[in-house]
Image (cartoon, rainbow, N blue to C red):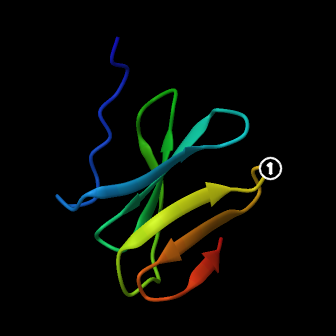
Amino acid sequence: EQIHVLNGHGGAPVRSISFSPDGAVVGTAGGDGTARLWSVGSGQQTAVLTGHDDVIHSLSFSSDGKLIATASGDRTVRLW
């Protein structure tokens, strides 16, 4: 059963998704160069992470859920 549809990358492909360690947040990385955080419970977007100059290919939460790492085609990894 579908719970939510998460729209927010402006029609760009979603390249990566990851659940936070507690399962309360899902992060998405997109072809629009942004990473977005979503509440699993409500399906609402809670944050937009901007700063990359190209597609974000990967997103990962740290094991304690306090940090997020993103990797982009702009040849950088950013910690949030």
| Coordinates of residue 2 in the picture (x, y in percent) | 33, 18
Q: Which residue is drawn at 45% across and 29% down?
A: 42
Q: Where is residue 1 in the image (x, y as percent from the top left)?
A: 35, 11
Residue visible at 30% across and 68% down in the picture: 31
Image location (x, y in percent) of residue 66: 77, 56
The one nearer the camera, 14 or 48, is 14
Q: In which quarter of the image is residue 54?
A: bottom left
Position of 60 compared to 58: left or right? Answer: right
Of the residues shown, which amino acid type is indicated by label 1? Ser
Q: In this view, does 15 lie to the left or right of 63?
A: left
Image location of residue 14, percent across then percent down = 32, 55
Q: Counting other residues with Cα less than 10 Å from the Cα at mark 1, is it few (<14), some (14-19), or many (20 or more)?
A: few
Instruction: Give the left or right position of residue 44, taking residue 58 as reference.
Output: left
Q: Residue furthest top?
A: 1
Q: Which residue is drawn at 41% across and 34% down?
A: 43
Q: Quadrant of residue 10?
A: bottom left
Q: Quadrant of residue 30?
A: bottom left
Task: Tell me the residue that label 1 is attached to.
Answer: 63
**Label total for image:** 1
For the C terminus, the quadrant is: bottom right
Q: Disc 1 on helix, strand or loop?
A: loop
View extreme (right): residue: 64
